[in-house]
Image (spheres, helix red, strand yellow):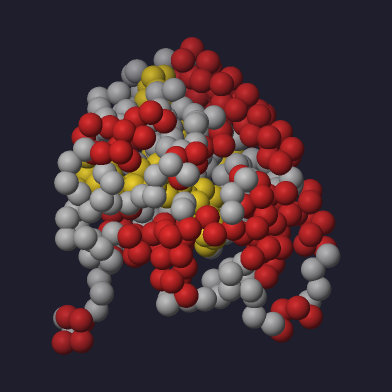
Amino acid sequence: MKKWEENVRKVVPYTPGEQPKEQNLIKLNTNENPYPPSPKVAQALQEMTIDCMRLYPDPSAHLLVSAIADFYGLKEEQVFVGVGSDDVLAMVFMTFFNSKKPILFPDITYSFYDVWADMLRIPYETVPLREDFTICAKDYCRENGGIIFPNPNAPTGVELPLAEIEAIIQANPDVIVVVDEAYVDFGAESALPLIEKYDNVLVVQTFSKSRGMAGMRIGYAMANPVLIKYLNDVKYSFNSYTMDQTTIALGKAAVEDRAYLEETVHKVVETREWTKRELSRLGFVFGDSKANFIFAAHKTCPAAELFAALRKANIIVRYFNKPRIDNYLRITIGTQKEMEAFVAFVEKYLSER
Ligand SMILES: *Cc1c(COP(=O)(O)O)cnc(C)c1O
């Protein structure tokens, strides 16, 4: 090792799901929406002029912030935007998790949390989920430096009821509680109303899943104005111009089309419920997902084997070779047609095995 390497910030980066180059794949591995963004987004893109690109974007992304505030009936001072919720969450870790006490998150959860904690030297402890993959709220009622969990949780899809989220917030008035609601639009109850009642809760959402805009990179946090101010102070100390003009304009167009969001979410939910019935019939076990994916184990066929067979058939799902979950596949809900092809392949594979 070179002398200078002693002073390198060494990190083990997050591994995102595969984005394969091949066409004609059924891609059920990264929880993207199978439907395109609102047609209003295409229209807004056409209306953009090239000349405006000479100018720096508005660092406050005011047009997008105000559109999001209008959508949820909030004040602009209650909304923070970032380049995907990954950017928002990284800012949240940097801003609010500065205690010497460990932050808490579930042992089975979004695998970026421990990466940010390690990178930012934040002590953390993971809290085991129950055997059925539910979060036990009581386990979060102890000394800590902050709390974060997704609701519904990823990769399990399991929802924590709002009353239990409120119990966690009430038991932790001295730290910030972050609810990562990346998948909440697919049927879980949002903790958003709690931001009016508690000053220590922050709700994070994204355009990547329910609004079908993972490629645009838009995430947002909603909380009381004091928390939002602290977040903006850190953001402006790091990089003021994170969100580009195109993203601001297209994000605004997307959030204004509430009807389209409801329509596409409805289609995904219908297909999810159909897929659950089919998976049960084929001998899978899984929690009651409220997200746009199902986390399932087969009663006799090991997940790693099925994962490889699916990959050979050009169907990609996600497999995590980690303790407690190494016999599960996380299957993103695609179009109805894609899920029918998925089910047909699995049924045939299992019957010939
Ligand atoms: C997908 C996801 C995110 C990140 O989404 P962005 O594309 O960065 O907005 C954050 N949290 C969870 C739990 C996710 O699954």
Q: Quadrant of the C terminus?
A: top left
Say if 9 sits above or below 306 in the image.
below
Q: Percent position (x, y) of residue 2?
A: 18, 85
Q: Nearer the viewer, residue 353 or 146?
A: 146
Location of residue 257 by image quarter: top right
Say if 240 sits above or below 292 in the image.
below
Q: Is residue 149 left or right of residue 338?
A: left
Q: Is residue 331 left or right of residue 262?
A: left
Q: Nearer the viewer, residue 129 or 93?
A: 93
Residue found at x 29% / y 59%: 97
Residue 7 appears in the rendering: yes
Q: Percent position (x, y) of residue 336?
A: 65, 28
Q: Percent position (x, y) of residue 335?
A: 65, 33
Q: Nearer the viewer, residue 33 or 160?
A: 160
Q: How many marks?
A: 0
Q: Residue furthest front?
A: 197
Q: Is residue 334 left or right of residue 12?
A: right
Q: Residue furthest bottom?
A: 3
Say if 228 sits above or below 179 in the image.
below
Q: Percent position (x, y) of residue 29?
A: 49, 42
Location of residue 123 by image quarter: bottom left
Location of residue 46 by image quarter: bottom right
Residue 29 appears in the rendering: no
Residue found at x 24% / y 47%: 104
Residue found at x 43% / y 60%: 226
Q: Quadrant of the N terminus?
A: bottom left
Residue found at x 28% / y 46%: 173
Q: Is residue 202 left or right of residue 142?
A: right
